[in-house]
Amino acid sequence: MEKRSTFNNLWLPYLLVAPQIIITFIFFLWPASQALYQSFLLEDAFGLSSEFVWFENFEELFSDPLYLDSFYTTVLFSVSTTFLSLSLSLMFAVMADRVIRGEMAYKSILLWPYAVAPAVAGVLWMFMFNTGNGILALTLQSLGYEWNHVLRGGQAMVLVIIAAAWKQISYNFIFFLAGLQSIPKSMLEASAIDGAGPVKRFWTIVFPLISPTTFFLIVVNVVYAFFDTFGIIHAVTQGGPYKSTEILVYKVYNDGFVGLDLGGSSAQSVILMIIVVSLTVFQFRYIERRVQY
Amino acid sequence: MATVSIKNAIKTYPGNVQALHGISIDIKDGELIVIVGPSGCGKSTMLRMVAGLETVTSGDIHINEEWVNKKEPADRDIAMVFQNYALYPHMSVYQNMAYGLKNRKIPKDQIEQRVRETAKILELENLLVRKPKELSGGQRQRVAMGRAIVREPKVFLFDEPLSNLDAKLRVQMRLEIKRLQERLGVTTIYVTHDQVEAMTLGHRLLLMNEGRVEQIGTPLEVYEKPQTLFVAGFIGSPSMNIIPAVLSSNGDLALLGDSLSLPLTHSENSANSDSQVTLGMRPEHLEACESEKASMFLQVEMLEKLGADTVVYGKLEQTELVLTVRLSGIHPVVSGDRLPLTIPSEHLHIFEIDSGKRLN
Amino acid sequence: MVENRPWLNALTHLLLIFGIIVVIFPIYIALVTSTHEAEDILTTVQPWFGSEMLENYGTVLQKGKVNASGIPVGMMMWNSLIMALGIVVGKITISILSAFAIVYFRFPLRKLCFWTIFLTLMLPVEVRILPTYAVVANLGLLNSYAGLTLPLIASATATFLFRQFFMTVPEELAEAARVDGAGPMKFFFDILLPLSRTNLAALFVILFIYGWNQYLWPLIVTTEESMTTIVMGIQRMLYVADAIPEWNITMATAILAMLPPLLVVIVMQRQFVKGLVETEK
Ligand SMILES: Nc1ncnc2c1ncn2[C@@H]1O[C@H](COP(=O)(O)OP(=O)(O)OP(=O)(O)O)[C@@H](O)[C@H]1O
Ligand SMILES: [Mg+2]
């Protein structure tokens, strides 16, 4: 797709793209290439000299059990978050699609979590699970279950998953609802006439038809869980206890800014970049949202 | 007021798509030229090159003796009416019409006066505050014309301006455009693929096919003496009967099939005798007659009684040639009849087989 | 579809009400907590609003949490607002201009520009924090609004959104404008920009939320407390060794942190949904 009629001007188009290109260079491409470059360097303890070490930083990373643990933690975290959020959203969307009265009211409120920053969402849930005065922690205690996510890694993980999934409900809900509403009503009517009940109808017709949406949302949610949830982790658990919730982005930050391990942190950044790039490419290739060019 | 001259205009689009293969025409001051031809033949391309919206690959375009190949559309003093009108959706009718004048730094009171005058001519006075989406198709069309007229340009360019209207409105607007053009006397190039529009509007027609000029002439010339087989087939409705024929050795008979012949007017014939040709006969020029005067018989297969005319379809006797005949009035012929036909020899069109050029 | 199954209708509403509760409950608890005195929520849950609302919010806005740096939350909100608006205006401006150039001009480096912009899609700030921090530090932009916003305003999605929209604008509109004597910038301001209104509104909502909710970036480029934004400010309130944990203050801050974006979502719901769906195209 190209415009057939365009304006002729030698310098104006350059002037128009300049701000974006300059910013992209200074704050995106240059830093990204720096990360790439530094990932091949080893700095001495005082940061005075550095040495080109090829893939040593990467080798070290992949032989570091802490890093591998963090990888595992990230996968567990993103898969759970994605699954939890998608199933809740899909259920709400299917219901909202069915409902005739009060649709707007339900819909409006289900959009709210999108407005809440991940870190704030984390704080809200953290408070409810706070040992001693959190409503959910106290409820669990009265049921005989001890909740203390400050000490127990598994519970900390559950907490951040819940907060992360909650925050993402709105987004998934909107896309599922849009997907559901684009299913031709005649198709559902036809199958209803064929005697399929609502449940059967959902699994045999609706669910396959919205599978492109589902697929797209899975990718988006994994990306979200990988990167946008930094705020939740940082505010709620700080990666703890005992690194049980230390996901990869948090580790990059922690090793780079707190541990000041430049080479290692850069190598981690590079790995993360490779992950985003693959996910993005995957999304563009296998989901019809292609950029035409 | 202006003349427009196009010399050997060639257009090659990126990707080596050659849309025009050398078009030339001289348009007189105040003339309305209709460019007509089938879809994709390059009409819009030609018009847009005159407008300055498309670069000229080679050739020259002059407006009022001035070479304009490299000029911006705005500097050519032309106005254009687009097929989809291209009204600015967020501007009122008034603003749409005033926009071009404002860009030319014309004083406000003068703009106001010109817009009101034009609105009056086009009966848009009551619609000036409306937005395009609050107008009917016909009204939008009028606003698009108003936007062109208000500029008082040297040349009007129309690109299928009526094709988005329903049939009735199209006829009405056609008359209106004709009247306006005569009244304003502005040189006009009008693109259409509708031959009726072309015939009724144009002072002269430029018939195009596949990027080439087929014929330039007045509507009557084009109808009576189509210079090519393409023109013959394109102009006229129902379209001309085209059948293969052979010129007899003495050069005065066209043989249809094996056993039929038609007398030809000797003097007009410039072809070699005994050669294969293509013969054209307009349905309306075939006449029903008494059997003894007939030069051919039609095996009637189907009829369309339109009231004013009767259109008869059938096979020419003893041949497999299919013919359309248009008889005026309500004719008593019925399906299965054997209809005796004749045709005055001046209405026979003979074309060379290979080139499609007219021979007589 | 006409379908009457009473139990199904009941279940539908039941599940949706459950959804509403899931969404609202955490916010409700925070709001209730923020209206009590710190002592009243030390060991118990308060189910209903207390009487300290004005008092607590007044304290928060003017003094913040005294034990944790004591920066007034009002000031944090101001910083967040500037950052959010800076990101909104900056992002929209540079992307609409570059989309305009890419769609309406042919120039030799056009494809290269397009792909350069496309790359930014793949480089979220989280993966390049260290070197980006170094760049911003070298430019002397730490603890400045420019440092907070500039690295976040290059965006492929906004550029693509505008590009997508410009492609749907009929060709003839630009041609009519050219015939009418409008140059490129005149066409841009007189015609393209007014036609982009709904897209601008949709992007405004999405980008405002995006900007306001930034966390990691402000966390590392602001070391001066006067530059703290509210979302990161909350985190600082969590980890102080209070004599009495002031959950009421923290929750009041949380409520204030979500209020502006929430209001935008509620007031501009239609544009919000449009923006969300369109930017993903
Ligand atoms: N921008 C372009 N790039 C490449 N080829 C083009 C372009 N515009 C037109 N063409 C080609 O040039 C030829 C002439 O196109 P043009 O639009 O002038 O036809 P037209 O006679 O106006 O047809 P229609 O009656 O359908 O409007 C066509 O074959 C078309 O495919
Ligand atoms: Mg055309």
Image: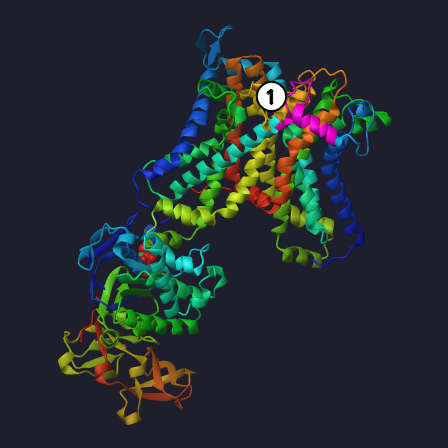
Q: Residue at x 76, y 15 (%)?
A: C243
Question: Is the residue indicated by label 1 positioned so its CB lies within 8 Å of ligand 1?
Answer: no
Residue C69 lies within the magenta run: yes
Q: Chain of mark 1?
A: A
The kind of secondary structure element at disc 1 is: helix
Q: Is residue B13 above or below residue C146?
A: below
Q: Nearer the viewer, residue A180 or C271?
A: C271
CA neighbours of label 1 inside 10 A, class few (<14), some (14 to 19), many (20+): many
Q: Residue at x 62, y 52 (%)?
A: A183
Along the horizontal axis of the image, is B28 left or right of B285? left
Q: Quadrant of residue C27?
A: top right
Return the x and y of residue B73 as percentages of the image width and height.
Answer: 29, 53
Along the horizontal axis of the image, is B13 left or right of A153? left
Return the x and y of residue A125 as percentages of the image width and height.
Answer: 72, 29
Return the x and y of residue A176 as percentages of the image width and height.
Answer: 63, 44
Q: From the image, which quarter does the N terminus of chain B lie in?
A: bottom left
User: Quick check: can you spot residue A194?
Assistant: no
Residue type (three-letter) at the residue carrying disc 1: Tyr
Residue B229 lies within the magenta run: no
Q: Residue at x 23, y 83 (%)?
A: B261
Q: Quadrant of residue B10?
A: bottom left
User: Quick check: can you spot residue A284?
Assistant: yes
Q: Residue at x 44, y 20 (%)?
A: C139
Along the horizontal axis of the image, is B187 left or right of B193? left
| Segment colored magenta | C54-74
The residue identified by callout 1 is A250
Return the x and y of residue A134 as percentages of the image width and height.
Answer: 78, 26
